[in-house]
Image (tube, helix red, strand yellow):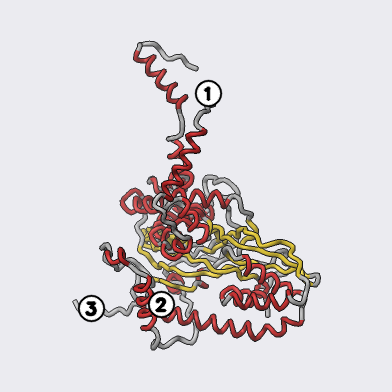
Amino acid sequence: MGYVPVKGGTRAIEASTQRLKYERLKDEEIVEIKTILSSMRGMIDQVMSEASLYSPELAALAIKQATGSMEEAVFLMRAHRSTLPRQYYSQTVEAETMFVERRISASFKDIPGGQLLGATYDYTHRLLDFDLLEEQPNSVQSWLAEYKKQFKNVETAQELVYFPKVVDYLRQEGLFETHEKNNAVPNDVTKKSLQFPSSRSARLQILTRGQTGAVTSLGYASLRGYGQVHPTVGEVRVGRIPIYLEYPNAVEQDSDDEFYIGEIRVTEVESFVPVKVKNDNNEDELDFEIGYGACYGQNETKAIAMSILDQCLEHTDVDFPTHDEEFVLLHIDSVESTGFISHLKMPHYVTFQSKLDSIRQVKKGVQPIES
Amino acid sequence: MKRRKRTEIMIQGNECLARELAESITQKYECLEISAPQYGMTMIKMRESAKNSLFYLGEVLITETKVEIEGRIGIGIVTGMKEDLSRNLAIVDAAYKAQLPETAAWQQPLLDMEQEIARARVREQTQLFETKVSFETMKV
């Protein structure tokens, strides 16, 4: 039995759309885009990351329009992205150029440059702060004035510090394998559908734009025994990295002639994963490999989980679901997974009636006719 | 001043500087807008540190403008939705490409702004350094 087009819901759909707007506006409270931009940093970061489009302004608009629904906001952003031309590809971004706002290691307490906590919830009490119910602009202003006052007498350094990578020191000691720079052009999953076995660049691109919850859950599953990766976090860094573009149609490459176009905030993680390798005498020996995670904004849980899954997918020969690239990569995209699940609520009258007819026939003791 | 440095300064610094420089050109020269400020995207290519290979992190929204002054085309590109800044960057870019005499006087204000940006960044980092951990080993 094929699909049968039906009509009759137009007025109901129009009324439903009006009702949706009414639900957003009925309390006559308007949330300004600038309020979302200033106070909903976590949501904006998550939406940008899952949408794979860095634009705090558009993310804030999407959050407002979607009344805070993350999956809807990501869907809106992805849809808008598809209407925009891709004008350029950036020069290669290197995380060493990051203006670091936070940088920690779970592997060493004394990392070169030190551990910088930055802004984090890690050490806060997870108790609701009822003072926020009564927060007023003047109390905010006086808190800010007090906060800034403490830095007035702090001696300022002469120049900016750029932090080296923890892993670079371990590589210098010969504890980690050193890889030459590989400048092969990456695969782009937005231009060409994912093929299996996948390339490393395609895997990383899909993981970084994966749904935060899905990436986190699968990373967690690997730790719990549905995978063989249990890392120690070598370094988590959050900060702003500059973006440069080559001059269009440049005949000669001259970095001084590039465009600087701005900064983006990213989270980057290197996880150290112990692995057993055979030495020259064919004996098992402990070695370390690195799992890599990076995503837009400050989203450390997702980046750490990505680093676990990156390492899992580097070893696809293991019989665990989190090491199966089709299982992981085809199920973590927000728009694909929420879209497919939510399509189930769309009319399936014909297919369901067909199944009912079959059951009725069976109950009556009649063999269903193959159609 | 080369493009990389001047775009760093005009984008990271106060937007008034780019506006002032652009206005000093548009008051004297005819400025033809070849392409009005429009939104587009740039795909970000990133190097991962595990295997040292490249991958695409995602796209970033940009605003781009193209103008023509004295027969030379200037391009202004900036992340985000910044139409005025993009247009002003394009005008400044065209002025440098056309080697207009006004650009000679821009060196000092640009360098002053560069120092201001550097001071602000160091100040911000100094504040962040207050969150630096000072470990003490405990006796057990």
The Cα–Cα distance between marks 2 and 3, rounded to whole angstroms, is 26 Å
Secondary structure of residue under mark 3? loop
Whether tag 1 and tag 2 are in contact, CB under 8 A, the answer is no
| Residue A314 image point, x, y percent | 46, 54
Mark 2, secondary structure of its residue: helix
A5 vs A116, left or right, is right
- Alpha carbons under labels 1 and 3: distance apart: 74 Å
Judge from the rendering whether residue B8 lies leftward or rightward of residue A248; answer left or right. left
**Position of residue B120 in the picture relative to residue A283 (left or right):** right
From the top left corner, tell me how far across and down residue B56 is, in percent.
Answer: 55, 58
Q: Are marks 1 and 3 in contact (CB under 8 Å)?
A: no
Residue A207 appears anywhere in the view: no
Name the kind of residue labelled 2 in the image.
Answer: Leu
- Judge whether residue B101 can be spotted in this image: yes
Q: Kindly give the residue lying farthest to the right in the view shown.
A: B71
Which of the two residues, A200 or A23, is positioned nearer the viewer here? A23
Q: Circle 1 sits in a helix, a strand or a loop, which is it? A: loop
* Residue at x 44% of width, y 74% of height: A169
Which mark is drawn over residue B138?
A: 3
Return the residue found at the far left. Answer: B140
Say which mark, if any, is on residue A2: 1
